[in-house]
Amino acid sequence: MKLRILLSCLLASIFFTGFAQNTKPVDKERYEPEPKVITAGRAFIDPPSDAVVLFDGKNLNAWVSHADTTKPAGWDVHDGVVTVKKSAGDIQTKRSFSNYQLHIEWCIPADISGEGQARGNSGVYLAALPNGSFYELQVLDSYKNKTYVDGMAGSIYKEFIPLVNPSRKPGEWQSYDVIWTAPTFNDDGTLKTPAKATVFFNGALVQNNVALTGPTWFPGQAYSKHGPAPIGLQAHGDLSKPISYRNIWVRELN
Ligand code: MG
């Protein structure tokens, strides 16, 4: 009997050691410093006259499927908002952009379930690249929902932690205002200047002109030469209820 207990303890310790190793966070999943929680003000801005309106609540005519750009964006437009349809996959704008100012509003369902990265996960691809890669500004429920801080709402995914956490409760609309400077490349394809992002989340600065080390599709991904690119929205594969977007516009800064 003693031997059996000893054996099962040994097996358990092997199992849990293996488990711990397999689930060890990758280098860029950091859990601190945790951004200070602040109460956000209102930051819902109507498009200025020189803006390109990407979604005004009526249709997705400015968008296509990310996986197959010959196909329409198959997300659900209703009640002046567009709700992610996970089975239709990511979507992207028909037009391509280099440097721009972007405004976008999003809402996590009030009855959201799940935790960590599996709770209202979506994302704004600041440039959706032809090779399937992208630079992602994370969208997630970060109201009392713990996850790695470089993967919370307002983060440049697995790159930059937001400066503060102005997240609102699920069910309340939130906004991002982004200033995006596209990367530039030399003729031989090497990087000339990195992509830069400034992000306001519910009116509070969360990213201050940060220089990205590459696309955020997976950590450590190197830059590869590209020109103007569409802006994309992520249909994340988690099982929580899909989120919604509204009032999306961009001003080109070329
Ligand atoms: Mg995401």
Image: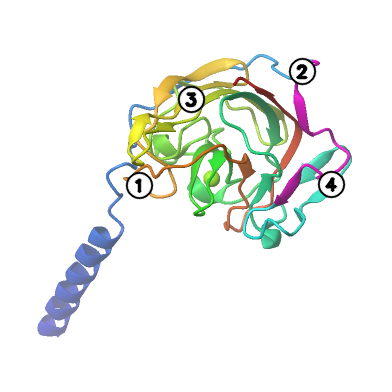
In-image side of 220 versus 145 (left or right)? left
Quadrant in which residue 202 is drawn: top right
**Residue in the foreground of this view, choosing between 104 and 32:** 104
Distance between the alpha carbons at the discs numbered 1 and 3: 17 Å
Residue 137 colored in magenta in the image = no
Q: Nearer the viewer, mark 2 or mark 3?
A: 2
Which numbered disc, 1 or 3, marks the residue that appears first in the sequence?
Answer: 3
Which numbered disc, 4 or 2, marks the residue that appears first in the sequence?
Answer: 2
Looking at the image, residue 70 lies above or below residue 212: below
Looking at the image, residue 42 lies above or below residue 123: above
Please, what is the three-letter code of the amino acid marked with disc 4?
Val
Q: Which residue is labeled 1 in the image?
A: 221
Label 1 beta carbon less than 8 Å to ligand 1: no
Residue 59 colored in magenta in the image = yes
Q: Which residue is labeled 3 in the image?
A: 197
Secondary element under disc 4, as helix, strand or loop, is strand
Q: Which residues are magenta?
A: 49-64
- Quadrant where the N terminus sits is bottom left
Give the colouring mode of the picture.
Answer: rainbow
Looking at the image, residue 228 lies above or below residue 236: above
Distance between the alpha carbons at the discs numbered 3 and 4: 29 Å
Ligand 1, by image quadrant, is top right
In-image side of 201 versus 21 (left or right)? right
Question: What's the residue at 61%, 19% (across, down)?
Answer: 253
Position in image of residue 84 (x %, y %)? 71, 50
Secondary element under disc 1, as helix, strand or loop, is loop
Secondary element under disc 2, as helix, strand or loop, is loop
Residue 50: mark: 2
Quadrant in which residue 85 is drawn: bottom right
Distance between the alpha carbons at the discs numbered 4 and 2: 25 Å
